Amino acid sequence: MEKFENTVSTLLEAEGFWVRRSFKVNVTLEEKRQVGKQSSPRPEIDMLAFHFGRNEVLALEVKDFLDSPGVKLAHLLEEHEVPAGRHKLFTSERYRTIVLARLLQDLIAAGMANAQTQVRLGMAVGKVNQGQSEAIRELIEGKGWLFWSPDDIKQKVVARTERANDPAPRAAAVAALAASDAAAVIEAAAGADVALPAPTPTPEA
């Protein structure tokens, strides 16, 4: 999981984002009552990605799902009044509205956002169940959210390794590109012996 998160973080940074992981949202007791989960712990966002040029924050679910069948479309199509299931922010509108609104307030209080900052939900995953990537993409992007499929991540890793001086990570990543999930590419290009190239510094304005 950590290697997958490291890879996604590197790719986001290469696209101009500043990344923070495992961010706990300070929902109030009253807000917990509103969503029907009064005794639940604070929601935790796997990864926040800030793009200050666009004044946008991505609230991302980032998981490899390698020890499971992968993300299933049926799970994302569920609708829950009270948050339940694997993807609560995606399947409970009330929960999502409250958590993302509180997230923005937390970020404003920390000096990391302002009242005009747009918070957008998203998902980056290492495995999808039985070729459902495009159906999941249509669902998620149709709601204005971000979706990085295993193939998206593989292609981004290969593009990054194309910029490396050492041909080893490029060859390893390309050889693994036909793998059924993102794990082989990440192992090939971001393993202990072969590292992803560092993000290119953003030029100063």
Image (cartoon, rainbow, N blue to C red):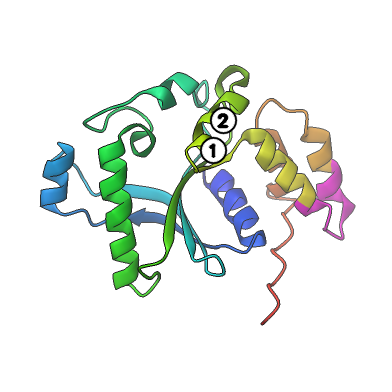
Q: Are marks 2 and 1 in contact (CB under 8 Å)?
A: yes
| Residue at 24 percent of width and 49 percent of height | 42
Q: Secondary structure at mark 1?
A: helix
- Quarter of the picture holding the C terminus: bottom right
Is 20 above or below relative to 81? below
Residue 136's spot in the image, x, y percent?
Answer: 54, 28
Does 156 sit left or right of 150 as displayed? right
Is 47 above or below relative to 201? above
Q: CA distance from mark 2 to mark 1?
A: 5 Å
Circle on res. 141: 1
Q: Secondary structure at mark 2?
A: helix
Looking at the rendered structure, the kind of residue marked 1 is Glu
Work out whether residue 102 or residue 153 is closer to the camera in this orientation and state it: 102
Q: Which stretch appears magenta? A: 160-171
Crowding around mark 1 (Cα neighbors within 10 Å: few <14, some 14 to 19, many 20+) is few
Name which quarter of the figure residue 155 lies in.
top right
User: Circle 2 sits on which residue?
Assistant: 138
Residue 83's spot in the image, x, y percent?
Answer: 26, 33
